[in-house]
Image (spheres, rainbow, N blue to C red):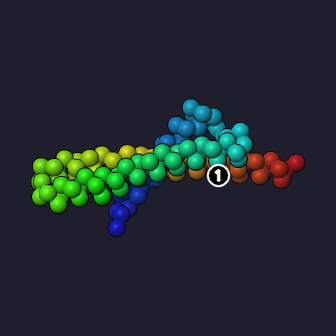
Amino acid sequence: MISNALKNMVESAVCTEHADIKHIHGERYASAHEGYGVLMEELHEATVELRDLDSLVREQLMEDLHDNDLSGMICSLTDVELFARKLAYEAIQVAAVARKMADTLAEIREEAEGA
């Protein structure tokens, strides 16, 4: 179970990333298609990190475990932690991009309804 404190930290990180994205790349996407493209790019990056993490655990850590290589397991687990952190960073970016895309679509809808 994830603690409320951690949930709050993740939400804060998503808000910070969302603000940074808007500051660097503009308040909204030019179109739903652009937002979708950026979202897919970030999702791909998160998927790569997850795949690498899964591969590390399934292959290297399993090999170390099978060989009863405690030093190897420690090194592999250090890498697992690093890859898990990288996955978390990418997941935060996916959430922030999704939020920006939702904001963009809401603005587009409002403009269409106001016309």
Q: Give the quarter of the image for residue 63.
A: bottom left
Regarding residue 47, the answer to whether it shows in the image is yes
Residue 15 visible in this rendered orientation of the protein? no
Residue 19: percent from the left, percent from the top? 54, 40
| Of the pair 38 and 20, the residue shown nearer to us | 38
Which element type, helix, strand or loop, lies under badge 1?
A: helix
Residue drawn at the location 22% of the way across and 50% of the way down: 76
Q: Position of residue 59 (x, y in %)?
A: 28, 55
Q: Nearer the viewer, residue 98 or 6?
A: 98
| Residue 62 spot, x, y in % from top left | 23, 58
Question: What amino acid type should be assigned to the residue bearing mark 1?
Answer: Ala
Residue lying at the far bottom of the rendered structure: 1
Location of residue 23 with respect to 63 vertically, above or below: above
Residue 37 lies left or right of residue 91; in this view the side is: right
In the picture, measured across the screen, residue 32 lies left or right of residue 41, that is: right
In the rendered view, does 24 fall on the left or right side of 48? right
Dot 1, crowdedness within 10 Å: few (<14), some or many (≥20)?
some
Name the quarter where the N terminus is drawn: bottom left
